[in-house]
């Protein structure tokens, strides 16, 4: 019985750790990337209204291929602009201001920033690519730097 309780407790800790794999504050993400020698992966999302955003979260962010790549190379920052979902009003306003400042008009938009916060790559849209293919897209953005990659159908 004690083993079962211990296993359930550890599983709960593990699942909470998996849920907390991203930040919601861009300056904190940049600082963390600088400290860890990584790039910043920024996702502008509409978590409760943007169907491609929801599919990306389900199909890519939860996949081990993406998690392993992101953990080793990136600091993830998710900037959500929901319609109905309740988030702190200041956080929503800050995310909206960042989207405007960074020229985000398509959701989801993915940015790769260097550790100083300079944009080196951008991907606008998610077309349902599997996690491994999306990781390849991110690797290409990291290599090319600066080019905008628009999803094509």
Image (cartoon, grey):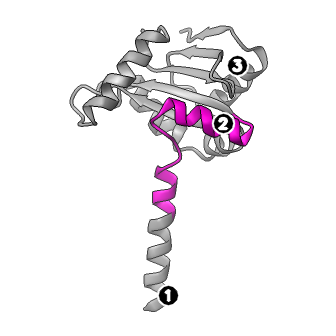
Crowding near pointer 3: few (<14 within 10 Å), some, many (20+)? Answer: many
**Secondary structure under the numbered disc 2 in the rendered image:** helix
Q: Which residues are magenta?
A: 14-38
Whether tag 1 and tag 2 are in contact, CB under 8 A, the answer is no
- Secondary structure, magenta segment, majority class: helix
Pick whichever, 91 or 109, lies toward us.
91
Residue 33 forms part of the magenta stretch: yes
Q: Position of residue 47 (x, y in %)?
A: 35, 31
**Secondary structure under the numbered disc 3 in the rendered image:** helix
Q: Position of residue 69 (x, y in %)?
A: 69, 40
Which of the two discs, 1 and 3, labels the residue nearer the N terminus? 1
Quadrant of the rendered image containing residue 8? bottom left
Residue at image point 68% right, 28% down: 115
Pick whichever, 132 or 40, lies toward us.
40
Disc ID at residue 3? 1
CA separation in Å, label 1 and label 2: 38 Å
């Amino acid at each position: 019985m004690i083993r079962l309780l211990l296993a359930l407790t550890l599983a709960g800790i593990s699942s909470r750790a998996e849920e907390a794999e991203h930040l919601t504050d861009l300056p904190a993400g940049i600082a963390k990337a600088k400290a860890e020698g990584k790039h910043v992966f920024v996702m502008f999302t509409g978590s409760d209204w943007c169907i491609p955003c929801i599919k990306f979260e389900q199909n890519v962010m939860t996949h081990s291929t993406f998690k392993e790549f992101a953990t080793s190379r990136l600091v993830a920052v998710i900037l959500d602009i929901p319609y109905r979902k309740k988030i702190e009003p200041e956080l929503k306003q800050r995310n909206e201001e960042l989207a405007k400042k960074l020229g985000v008009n398509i959701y989801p938009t993915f940015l790769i920033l260097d550790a100083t916060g300079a944009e080196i790559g951008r991907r606008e849209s998610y077309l349902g690519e599997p996690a491994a293919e999306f990781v390849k897209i991110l690797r290409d953005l990291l290599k090319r730097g600066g080019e905008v990659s628009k999803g094509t159908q």
